[in-house]
Amino acid sequence: PLFFGPSGALTEYAPRRITALKVKFPHLRVRLASPLVDMTEPHDQRMAAILEDRVRTALAAEGAPPAVILDDHGSPVRGVAGVRDHLALQLQLRLGTAARAVCAASMERRPEPEYSFNEPLLEHALAQPGFDVGTVMVALLFLSPGRHAGPGGDIAQICAAAQQRQPRLQTVMTDPVGSHPGLIPILVDRVRAALTRPPL
């Protein structure tokens, strides 16, 4: 699956659909691979390396070290937010002095208090001290542009609104990670590992 973490689509929806299909096709065997970031392998930094490459590419024309916000969509699943936070820490260590600060944020969240693990939202992060002035790099934890991460999309609008409120703020968005060649060896490893597991 081309998912960053343990989305409900992988942990709930896919197993339910496979169970239903096996009623009609009893010989069906499905092996479900791990997502791109497997939290049982906490030392794997390949996704953080992809994000670092996106940030450093966008940094090429910049001057002073920027602050960096690693931004994902937001999820009702705490484990997905945990992946985002884990990657933000890895990214901070990899960037070192190339970034003056790094934090994780989400584009949106459900309003109920039990989903507060998605905080800060991007709009709130862009109002925090150190992230509200100077150059702030928004590192997109998105696979493709779409209506959220594309030109004029939701994230661009959030950044533009923040710049209206804070005239000394300049935001720069990285490219999404889905077209990065570093994804291929991760997917190859996920397939190979899945082939050693019993089917669902």
Image (tube, helix red, strand yellow):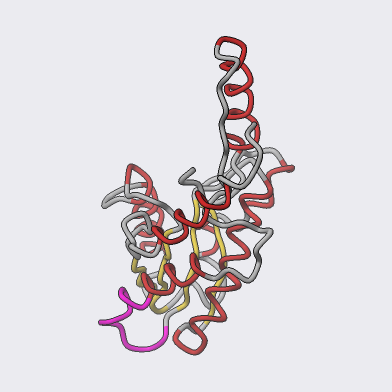
Return the residue found at the far top.
Answer: 24
Q: Nearer the viewer, residue 106 or 129?
A: 106
**In the image, is residue 33 above or below residue 87?**
above
Residue positioned 54% across, 74% down in the render: 102
Q: Position of residue 16 (x, y in %)?
A: 63, 23
- Residue lying at the far right in this picture: please name it: 114
Q: Position of residue 166 (x, y in %)?
A: 41, 68
Does residue 185 sit above or below 5 in this rendering?
A: below
Look at the image and give the residue range highlighted in magenta: 56-65
Q: Compared to 61, does 15 lie above or below?
A: above
Residue drawn 55% across and 49% down? Answer: 35
Q: Nearer the viewer, residue 128 or 74?
A: 74
Q: Quadrant of the C terminus?
A: top right
Q: Classify residue 155 as left or right of residue 11.
A: left
- All told, the count of numbered labels is 0
Determine the image quadrant of residue 12: top right
Q: Quadrant of the rendered structure where residue 135 is?
A: bottom left
Q: Is residue 63 magenta?
A: yes
Considering only vertical position in the picture, is 89 above or below 99? above
Report the side of 22 relative to 174 (left or right): right
* Residue 171 within the magenta-colored segment of the rendering: no
Residue 95 in the image: x percent, y percent? 48, 82
Side of 179 where 47 appears, left or right: right
Q: Position of residue 73 (x, y in %)?
A: 49, 48
| Majority secondary structure in the magenta region | loop
Residue at figure coordinates x 59%, y 41% from the top left: 7
